[in-house]
Amino acid sequence: MAATADETRVIDGVKTQLFIGGEWRDATGGATLDVEDPATGETIASVADATHEDADAALAAATEAFKTWRNVAPRDRADILRRAYDLIDARAEELALLMTLEMGKPVSESLGEITYANNFLRWYSEEAVRINGRFTVNETGKGRVLTLRQPIGPCLFITPWNFPLAMGTRKIGPALATGCTCVVKPAKQTPLSMLALAQIFEEAGLPGGVLNVITASSSGKIMQPLIEDPRVRKMSFTGSTPVGKELIKQSAEQVLKVSMELGGNAPFLVFGDADLDAAVEGALLAKMRNGGEACTSANRFHVHESVASEFADKLAAKIGGLKVGRGTEDGIQVGPLIDEAQRSKVAELVDDAVGKGARVLTGGSRVDGAGYFYEPTVLADVPQNADLLSEEIFGPVAPITTFSTDEEAIAAANDTEYGLVSYLFTQDLGRAFRVIEGLETGMIGLNQGMVSNAGAPFGGVKQSGFGREGGPEGLDEYLETKYVAMNVGTEPTALQ
């Protein structure tokens, strides 16, 4: 399929070299990495394929820049973040098309991600001037307690392919606001959005070396030496739990401060008193956002037995009516999966469930032709031993099971090693709080199918990771607290 004039213009507008120390440069040796459109399987661009030497140069640049960036006035740091926000806002449509071309989601969804991603820059531009310590009288009265909050130092960021801009700004925003510098390694499938962001920060006046972007075909080969380098003080990773565990092990060498946003297995609970139409709409959003390729995607639906059949039929009608195709086309609601490996995994999980007795209400098959498309799918009567109830699907598949009591629902929701997000629909406020307090997840959507918010702490528990991104909590991830015990030469007044 030939690229349109707009597609060619947008792709040609992105610099495809490494961004190190404020300069664009080829990889050492000149190697490149192809980027493909998952809707067609065709190569749309080639970017620099970094070596360890390039990664080391990026860290050296971040280390040197930290010496001055940490002392830049908070208002000046805020102004740069705000200028970047304004530039992204002005170019939202071009950035959305770029994102769709490399990741596959419909342009309308890409526009939504651009807004979400940009909100992190706006939020942290406002927070940069609100980094406070405290000054108090010592409890003995003989001195004073002073605390300072200072930037932790150079940071390493490893971002995923499913939200190629938002997972970057969610880390970069608070890091720059606090005075930290960073080296970013985007996913090899979707490097263009991050390279475009680097260009925007360059235009916004960010000093060289504060943000460095290295693209590479092998993340482990170039990142492990950096993780074990004493110049690094912070690492943030968004991705799978198995990879996260390896990174945690590597980070122990330098006792890095680490944020891990890992896998999920989100339960979606529908109680007998729920507004079913609202629950179906919430389910559609929680399941089909990003085509199901999201760690927050509803992975399994636990529905009260009294309403399970009606809920399943309504959800199947909605999901079965979604239009599948290339995300650049008008009216498309579901794009392709990221690659053939991901589509094969989804197909295997569906086939396993059906083979064990699940009923296909809609979908259930690959889509013939070019690209990595899979039909939006709803499965009913899913048995407890089906693999997709315990594994993260990362695709447009909604498996439905039933429960009888609130206790049974909570137990089913918690029956996983993961604990990122849960969703529940009920009109009983008492039940809502009992369930909320019983759920073992870092986030909960009550009567809504979306939790992502730049002003709120995003993160999980158990094997979904630790640390928080977003909100004031996200700022804390990039700050160290320094305590000063002060002898001010005063004596407390004696109690008479």
Image: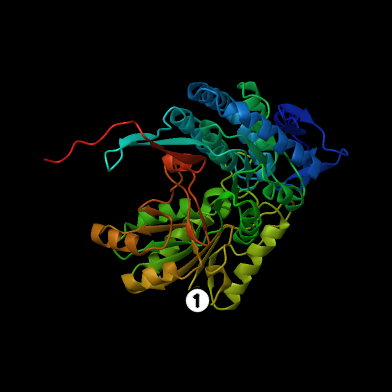
Q: Is residue 155 left or right of residue 289?
A: right
Q: Residue at x 71, y 26 (%)?
A: 22
The answer to whether residue 207 is left or right of residue 135 is right
Q: Position of residue 361 (x, y in %)?
A: 52, 66
Residue at 39%, 65% (x, y): give it. Answer: 310
Q: At numbered mark 1, what does the secondary structure look like: helix, strand or loop?
A: loop
- Report if residue 248 is visible in the image: yes
Total number of numbered labels?
A: 1
- Nearer to the camera, 143 or 355: 143
| Residue 397, image x, y percentages | 55, 61
Q: How far from the left and from the top, in percent, is residue 417?
A: 51, 67
User: Which colour style is shown?
Assistant: rainbow
Q: Is residue 94 visible?
A: no
For label 1, the residue is: 384
Name the residue: 33% across, 64% down: 271
Residue 472 quadrant: top left
Where 145 sits versus 440, above or below? above
Residue 319 at x, y = what percent?
Answer: 51, 56
Describe residue 304's horizontal placement relative to residue 234 as left or right.
Answer: left
Q: Nearer the viewer, residue 483 or 303?
A: 483
In this view, the residue in front, 323 or 456, is 456
Classify residue 328 as left or right of residue 319: right
